[in-house]
Amino acid sequence: MHKLLKFILKILAKRVMARYQPTVIGITGSVGKTVAKDAISTVLSRKFWVRKNEKNYNNEFGVPLTVLGIDPSLSTANIRPSNWRRLLKFLPKLAEGLWLALSPLKLGYPKFLVLELASAKPGDIDYLVDIVGPQVGIVTAVGEVPVHVEFYANPEAVAKEKARLIAQLPPDGLAVLNYDDQTVLDMKERSRAKVVTFGFSELADVRASDVSYFASDDNKNIGGFSFKINSSGTFIPARINNLVGSHQIYGALAAVAVGLHFGMNLVDVSEALENIELPSGRMNLLPGIKNTVVIDDSYNASPLSTHAALDALRDFTKAREKLGYRGRQIAVLGDMKELGRYEIEAHRAIGNLVAERCDILITIGAAGKLIADSAANQMPKENVMSFDSSDEAKMKVQEIIKEGDVVLVKGSRAMRMEVIVEEIKTR
């Protein structure tokens, strides 16, 4: 059933692509894909009709379903004859996709498709590029130990897979690469398309400078960060509410590069970024119980993104201190999955960072105990706690937090870190 559905979706999606010829912006990387996707979609939507893939529907099912305009949540692993209710909902939508592909009359269709492209295993990028044929390719970041490395021979193989997106861009296309990540920057050698770089380096074509966090007493916008966007000798200030983490700025800079490429100006881009709405679980600032602040990064975790999240916890807490808040920095960290033979090394490295960036550490999961063990060598042992699951930990987290604390919650999807967030956020 799955193989047949996969084949049908590929054929229909390719037919739609050939018929309507939207401009496709493909995004890959180990971290920051969703922020880049949402930022690009928000920016381009000021002038164009744009469609993006929702949530994490970025694989061999989610991408073609997005092309066809079908809600991807109706498909994937739950479509099978035994699940007839879901099947009955899906089949009419599939018929609509068939009509879009084969109707004698052309229907309305978006000008741009902004698509995350999964690279969970070798061959994924080639499969998806064959369907959608991106004109613009973006690589956000890779890092030393990328997510999904478990399914590759080594980190270099992960980077090689992601570089397939850049290598297959047409000569009149655009490659948008992170200047600050050397692995990503090296991909420029594989591009036939024009290359534009982004980052914090002064050598990047689109760069951020003067980054600062702000905190607010406003319960709706409790903080965020501001920065300057620099391009072609000019700059403009930008501000993003309810989001922290300087690594998130990379996604915004990628959006600037894409917007400028398609004729937008810095003022329009900056205004669009201020209104970006991100899905939950990605460095979102939330009001917490006991007058605390929760940094909700519960959606997923990799070594690179966890390091960046801990930096954000430290820096945002310092910004709040300027308003007179005197709270502690608390990290609730779950296992980082899909690291294969790098699991022990990566978790211990995070543990070594924790003592410099937080006052209290709570870990969840078997690998999380490795984080705790390393951290306990450098901070008071009574400030380090470990639990097997989020359900076991949630009441302890609620018990120990105090007024003014900033609480980072982060871990891989399998760890269900959102359980912690639900327990301590203001309802």
Image (spheres, rainbow, N blue to C red):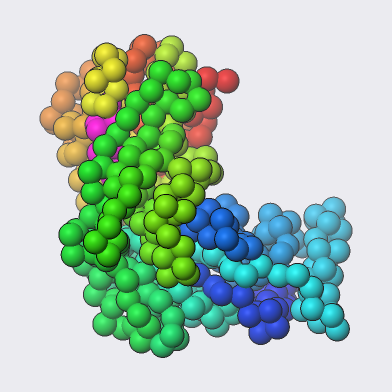
Residue 249, image x, y percentages? 34, 50
- Which residue does the image show at 50% across and 63% down from the upper left? 116
Q: Is 88 in front, or is 372? A: 88
Q: Is residue 250 left or right of residue 350?
A: right
Viewer-proximal residue among 178 and 120: 178
Q: Residue furthest left?
A: 378
What stretch of residues is rendered in magenta?
A: 308-317
Which is the main secondary structure of the residues drawn in magenta?
helix
Q: Is residue 13 visible?
A: yes
> Is residue 190 positioned above or below 215 on the image?
below
Query: In the rendering, at what x and y percent does residue 381 appear?
Result: 20, 22
Point out residue 253 in the picture as x, y percentages from the top left corner.
36, 57
If the image is split into quadrants, where does the C terminus sit? top right
Please determine whether, in this image, residue 325 is positioned above or below residue 76. above
Q: Can you tell which quarter of the image residue 56 is in?
A: bottom right
In magenta segment, residue 313: yes
